[in-house]
């Protein structure tokens, strides 16, 4: 039992969720390592949603609600940390939810689907086909899901798949604490914030945004600026650390 007044409570709860998910087969051990990389960048960010990240979250919502066929791609870490939040965002944005894994086995696909469904998420299912321009099983996705999507939200993605989706002409929204990752650099909209902080803000924005403001956010969007602001926020933390 983690004491609620522990100064690192949220971080310890997230670690426990990842550890439990490794035991239940939802997260592979490599996913635990990816989580640790995220934690390090969150430390640099001051474990808060910066003003720039809040703007990215509103922009992400604008792209999602303006999409004709939005899809949320869910991997093991995302399911383990934020199954309920994914369900809420899917309902608010009208997006479909597809499970898409780097380390793909039928057993994991089933475990993640069951876990999401237990949290009220409607999961798109069907026969996956090799439709993405990637080698091996990483090319697999659903024809009526990610393949047909115009806007794809891919939290905690790896760079190759993000680039593959962009090369197919899709708008890619990602949530990634590392502003230097290939994913962060390749995506259309990069939310540099922790997944469980970012998702509720995006959901609330989907509910609040009017058509004019959403159109304006999309028109004015500048991902290079968002990334530069995220790096600047981290630099500021480091500068103050040695003051
Ligand atoms: P890339 O291939 O894009 O260069 P990578 O090799 O780091 O990046 P992965 O190993 O798949 O890609 O890691 C996923 C990314 O998710 C990492 O950049 C990590 O910082 C980020 N991340 C991990 N946990 C979280 C979280 N809870 N919230 C937001 N981002 C996270």
Image (tube, grey):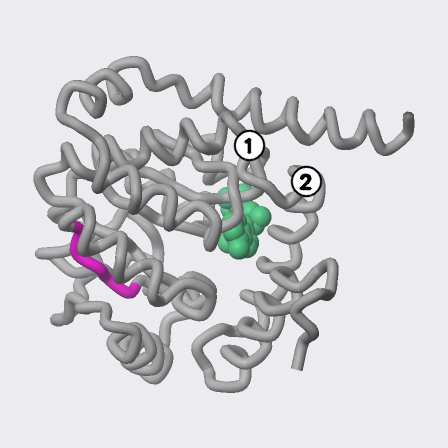
Direction from residue 8 to residue 97 in the image, left or right: left
> Quick check: 34 above or below 213?
below
Q: Which mark is residue 50?
A: 1
Q: Label 1: how many residues lie within 10 Å, few (<14), some (14-19) or many (20+)?
A: some
Dividing the picture into quarters, in which one does residue 141 lie?
Answer: bottom left
> Which residue in the protein does label 2 denote?
46
Q: Residue at x 25, y 15 (%)?
A: 219
The Cα atoms of the two marked residues, 1 and 2, are separated by: 9 Å
Image quarter of residue 236: top right
Quadrant housing residue 135: bottom left
- Magenta segment: 95-99
In depth, the one of 219 and 51 nearer the eye is 51
Residue 136 can be seen, yes or no: no
Q: Is residue 74 left or right of residue 52?
A: left
Q: Is residue 5 above or below residue 60?
A: below
| Residue 58 in sight in this render | yes
């Amino acid at each position: 039992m983690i004491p609620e007044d522990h100064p690192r409570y949220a971080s310890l709860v997230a670690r426990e969720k990842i550890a439990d998910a490794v035991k239940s087969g939802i997260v592979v051990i490599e996913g635990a390592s990816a989580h640790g990389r995220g934690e390090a960048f969150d430390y640099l960010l001051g474990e808060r949603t910066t003003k720039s990240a809040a703007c990215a979250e509103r922009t992400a919502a604008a792209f999602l609600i303006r999409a004709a066929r939005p899809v949320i791609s869910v991997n093991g870490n995302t399911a383990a940390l934020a199954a309920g939040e994914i369900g809420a965002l899917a309902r608010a944005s009208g997006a479909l939810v597809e499970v898409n894994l780097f380390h793909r086995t039928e057993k994991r696909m089933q475990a993640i689907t069951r876990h999401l469904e237990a949290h009220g998420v409607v999961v798109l299912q069907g026969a996956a086909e090799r439709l993405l321009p990637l080698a091996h099983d990483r090319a697999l996705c659903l024809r009526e899901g990610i393949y047909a999507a115009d806007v794809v939200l891919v939290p905690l993605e790896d760079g190759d798949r993000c680039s593959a989706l962009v090369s197919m002409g899709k708008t890619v929204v990602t949530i990634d604490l590392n502003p230097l990752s290939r994913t962060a650099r390749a995506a259309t909209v990069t939310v540099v914030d922790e997944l469980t902080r970012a998702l509720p803000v995006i959901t609330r924005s989907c509910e609040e945004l009017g058509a004019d403001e959403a159109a304006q956010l999309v028109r004015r969007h500048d991902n290079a600026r968002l990334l530069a602001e995220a790096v600047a926020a981290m630099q500021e933390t480091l500068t103050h650390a040695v003051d």
